[in-house]
Image (spheres, rainbow, N blue to C red):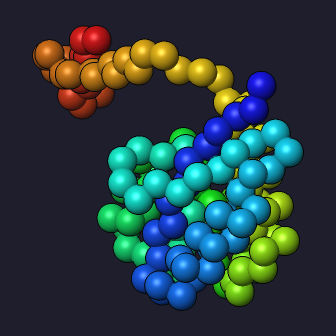
Amino acid sequence: MRASYSIRFITEHEQDRVLLKSVLSTFGHRPTVDWHYEKEGSVDVVMLDIDHCSSFDLEFAHNISKAIIFYTADMTLAAQKPLVLHKPAHARDFLQVLDKAATYLADRPVVTNKVTIVAKPVSHVANDDGEPVGVYSM
């Protein structure tokens, strides 16, 4: 069965966005995956121009996607992140990182319900040295 994944590009440079969207529309139908661009809403992958983004952009990318492709001129980032596309983007490199992203997404465990456990301090006690120690309730 073919997979279908969505992607969004977050970059200040319209030229990069147009180039990447063009390559995606031309070559986005990979042997086992169909990629499509989504302008709004949650997506499977965000390609984030990490050289020109704010901390808000990074947090936003994490909140709306399952994976982030870091688009950067910084060659050292490749050793730190699993999905990196180096500037300037070339179609071959872009397609290779899309294939890596598809593998990453396919290997992820499926999460059907997200549960958040918040620990709240309910009382304070002191340890043997008299320092306060929080007692938490889940």
Residue at 36% from the left image edge and 47% from the top image edge: 41
Quadrant of the frame with the C terminus: top left
Total numbered labels placed on residues in the image: 0
Residue at 62% from the left image edge and 80% from the top image edge: 19
Q: Which of the pair 78/39 is nearer the observer?
A: 39
Q: Is residue 28 toward the left or the right of residue 99 in the image?
A: left
Please, is residue 31 above or below residue 1 in the view?
below
Residue at 72% from the left image edge and 66% from the top image edge: 26
Query: Horizontal and vertical percent for residue 133?
Result: 26, 25
Residue 76 seen in this snapshot? no
Quadrant of the frame with the N terminus: top right
Q: Is residue 84 toward the left or the right of residue 62 in the image?
A: right
Residue at 53% from the left image edge and 57% from the top image edge: 37
Q: Which of the pair 65/22 is nearer the observer?
A: 22
Q: Is residue 125 toward the left or the right of residue 74 in the image?
A: left
Residue 29 seen in this snapshot? yes
Residue 18 placement: quadrant:
bottom right
Q: Residue furthest left?
A: 123
Query: Horizontal and vertical percent for residue 126?
Result: 22, 21
Query: Horizontal and vertical percent for residue 116?
Result: 34, 22
Q: Is residue 37 toward the left or the right of residue 20 in the image?
A: left
